[in-house]
Amino acid sequence: MVKRTRSISAFVFLGLALVSAGRSHASTLATQTALPGDCVPQFKVEMPVFGPAGSLPRVDAARHSQLTVTMKEIGQVVLPDPRKVKYPARDSFGNACPQLFFKETRLWTYESSDSLTKKVLGPANWPAVTLEATRGVPTVVKFKNELPPFGPGNGLVQGLLTVDQVIHWADPLNRMCSPIDCTLPQNAGNVCCKPFVGFPPTVPHLHGAEVPAAFDGGPLAWFTADGLVGPQFGSLIHPGAGEAIYQYNNSQEPGTLWFHDHALGSTRTNVYSGLEAFYFIRDAAKEPRNLPSGKHEIEMAIQDRQFDTASQLFFPDGSGNDVATSNLNGPPTNPDVNPFWNPEFIGDVAVVNGAPWPYLDVEPRRYLFRLLDGSNARVYRLSFGKAHVYQVGADDNYLDAPVKVDKVFVAPGERAYVIVDFSELGGETVTVTNDAPVPFPDGLYPVPHVDPATGLLIPADQPGMARIMQFRVSGKQVSDSSCNPVTECRRPTALPRLTDGKGHIAPGVKIDKVRRLALKEHSGPGGPLEVLLNNTNFDAMNAPHILRDFPDGISELPRIGTTELWEIVNMTADAHPIHTHLVQYQILNRESFDVDGTQGSGIANGYIGIDNGGSTSVPGAWAKAFGTPPPAQCDFIDPLNPCPGFGPPLKYDKGDTIDLSNGQHKVPLVGGNPDVTPYLLGDATPPEPEESGYKETAKSIPGQVLRILVRWAPTSTRIGDSRPGVNLYPFDPTVGAYMWHCHILDHEDNDMMREYKVKK
């Protein structure tokens, strides 16, 4: 969210250098001392593995079609045992490392059991045990929320992970806290200015699933252990307090899904606590034949975390007198508005499958790794040393053919299935490295980098995060009969193509509507307040430009069976992984636009305007579209964003049409944003080959228009078989609402999320 300047990076350096100098508080409810990531030893812990290769099982959901998944708090050994592993004496800045008090780490986890026999199939763990479903065989899951509130004994996690009650959140106690200035002395005792303490609201979301809205795990369908429920919980079967039954049809194409918590306003803390797991859908007839399997197929959830000297999770909320030392991202940017929320969580320990900087022993042969970026905000650009890497799938679907990649580039929520070939590396060690900054593309760097202003090489901000894990390849030769990605490992049947993968709409694809939607950041005196989709808050209740035409606040109303072109105009300084529920899409292209009038359009001030900082900034086309003077309801705090939360500058549907490059004329254009076409720089770039298949989470890059083709039909539907008004799902998706949002969890928790409804 924040474009980092060198002064801020220098501040972070200072914070890192001081981190072990004194007490720091990650939470107002629990006094903690930060354990710098550099003080955690690397490559000393073996990576936990699920399935045939490891000590953790997978759950066969076809054999156990009625499952109970219980959310519970547990203790789990995460950090290396200092009685067995030597810890560094000093961090990378030369400071003495604090003493570690080794304990189990308290976590929130999922435990899976057979609903009929009550037998535990997947023990509670971070991340949870993978569920394996068979395509066409439904899975019925009873989710039970047994998470305790903060208190003595069992309820520690809530005390470590502060929930900000002033943001728009689940609010099970109905306190209606916003707005309130918690920096004022008279509000010091107000319960809204304190972290939430009570039974935690949760709602499981199967990320990537084609499911009815009732089972989608929307953020308003939350429930608590003591029986409180959210406004969209009502359509679920709930056999008891804190319980809800979901049915997953598993009718979609095979691939790698994952499930995680999605409660409104506390997704970032609930997922950070450990509530995430893989979910596979298998169908041998639709998957590439003879992929590495059995003990040679391994799922890996990659995340970043911070820890304290008592071995507990550390999630800073700005508490304490030395907040700079406890938070790599600085204190909350605007505590008078949000007392605890921060724009992004930045960790300093790389964690894979719940283990910090682990190693894995492998054979000199090919492996299939299913990678998930499960971090709150961190993007990864991974290299696998001298090993050859081929990507065979992304998000929920397999690619038509393997793509050789030098780096695996994933943002929060994205998955990549890669074949890594160790066959020529017997006896060697392969270190997986990372060179992506956070926030992306200009933030804290794990590697030395060139300062664009001076051309000088700058040291890494987070050198420890340049390494993720190690593979130790045995020297013993083994046979390998898996498919060769150079010539094989292809899909049995080609993907239905909405695009040609080269930046053009595929032949035979009719676009029914174009939606031009904007990503816009709203800042306060201290920095970012929130990022909004189409300048509209989650419920649009402060958006008269939306409510005048959409009384329920829901403006995205695609028709079942139609195909739409979404143009997402990123006017922020950060990359945002844009995720759609129910539907997957194909990336058409990305194209730069003239931000400030200096990049080639020839139009003064460009689309956004000239950012001089504060009131001297010069607005561009987007801000000018609100009119002069802007509507009376506008704040007019920032000339580049005069109406935060107001909705788009123009009427959402004002009858515009657009001609498309595939020969279609007068296609309806909606969204309410001024025309970006005159500002385009003509550098439209097709998706990378490894992201050219179906996606439901894709990176929107600053200063670019991300164009995606979205079809409201199952991904397996052939081109031409989908028609407006015809439902091809095995359920009715026109009942209820789905989400589209940014998958940086800290962003979606603070209103970078919108509902949409599918119309008949």
Image (cartoon, rainbow, N blue to C red):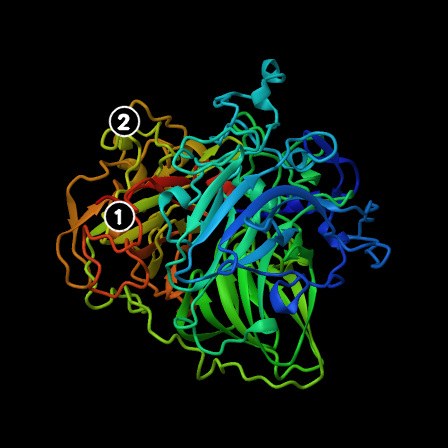
Give the camera-side residue of 606 and 505. 505
Residue 418 x/y as whole percent = 51, 70
The quadrant of the rendering that contains the C terminus is: top left
Residue 49 x/y as whole percent = 64, 63
Q: Is residue 327 left or right of residue 285?
A: right
Q: Residue at x 41, y 28 (%)?
A: 637
Q: Is residue 587 left or right of residue 396?
A: left
Quadrant in the picture for residue 195: top right
* Location of mark 2 (residue): 629
Crowding near the residue tagged with mark 1, few <14, some 14–19, many ≥20 C-alpha atoms within 10 Å:
many
Asked if residue 345 can be seen in this view, the reply is no
Residue 490 x/y as whole percent = 41, 77
* Location of mark 1 (residue): 515
Asked if residue 228 can be seen in this view, the reply is yes
The kind of secondary structure element at disc 2 is: loop
Q: Residue at x 69, y 62 (%)?
A: 358
Q: CA distance from mark 2 to mark 1?
A: 27 Å
Instruction: Identify whether 693 is placed above or below 71.
Output: below
Residue projecting furthest to the front = 117
